Image (cartoon, grey):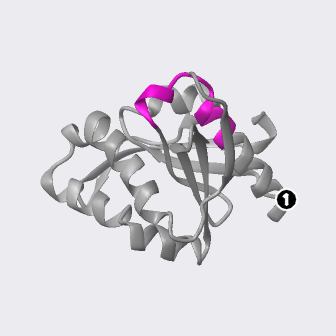
């Protein structure tokens, strides 16, 4: 990883760049296993306007940046659910996801100190990465609106 990675909040107007980052990883690693309905639903969820609208509501988005480009992102809903966590292919397995999650959990703890656990609905591709981050599967794979996911959770007392 040639460039130093920095972390910050998503800025107003950055929805398009964040969406592009998400869709690049999704298209390569996750999308091939989805139905057309699932791909359409996911694209709607990560559309720039949807990302920006949610970040003005009960979600927050943090991004990783290297060499002037976005290389990772995390979106958290209600201070207890990881809605999205994506890292650019060239920056995977370099600690970017770990650092994004750690930053997000610090914010969760500051906002709601008694939060006991954080959940995520992982793609099949992401299960191993989430397990390395400390999440455990909490139920069988499910599919909703064509989006297949595995529910997982992490007790904050077990987190970093």
Give residue 41's quadrant in the image: bottom left
- Quadrant occupied by the N terminus: top right
Question: In screen coordinates, is 159 left or right of 101?
Answer: right
- In the rendered view, tell whether residue 47 sits above or below residue 150: below
- In the rendered view, tell whether residue 44 sits above or below residue 108: below
- In the rendered view, tell whether residue 79 sits above or below residue 6: below
Residue furthest front in the image: 68
Q: Is residue 99 magenta?
A: yes
Give the percent coordinates (x, y) of residue 68.
Answer: 56, 44
Q: Is residue 156 magenta?
A: no
**Residue drawn at 59 percent across, 56 percent down:** 81
- Quadrant occupied by the C terminus: top right
* Residue sitting nearer the eye, 94 or 118: 94
Q: Which residue is mark 1?
A: 110
Range of residues picked out in magenta? 88-100
* Residue sitting nearer the eye, 123 or 49: 49
**Residue drawn at 24 percent across, 43 percent down:** 31
Q: Is residue 32 visible?
A: yes
Question: In screen coordinates, is 81 left or right of 128?
Answer: right
Q: Is residue 112 visible?
A: no
């Amino acid at each position: 990883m040639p460039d130093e990675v920095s972390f910050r909040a998503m800025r107003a107007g950055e929805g398009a760049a964040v969406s592009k980052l998400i869709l690049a990883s999704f298209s390569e690693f996750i999308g091939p296993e989805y139905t057309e309905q699932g791909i359409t639903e996911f694209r709607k969820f990560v559309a720039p306007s949807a990302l920006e609208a949610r970040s003005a509501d009960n979600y927050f988005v943090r991004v990783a940046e290297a060499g002037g480009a976005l290389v990772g992102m995390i979106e958290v809903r209600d201070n207890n659910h990881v809605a999205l966590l994506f890292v650019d292919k060239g920056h995977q397995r370099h600690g970017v996801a770990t650092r994004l999650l750690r930053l997000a959990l610090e914010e969760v703890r500051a906002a709601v100190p008694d939060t006991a656990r954080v959940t995520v609905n992982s793609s099949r591709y992401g299960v191993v990465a989430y397990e390395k981050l400390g999440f455990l599967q909490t139920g069988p794979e499910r599919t909703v609106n064509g989006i297949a996911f595995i529910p997982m959770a992490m007790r904050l007392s077990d987190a970093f």
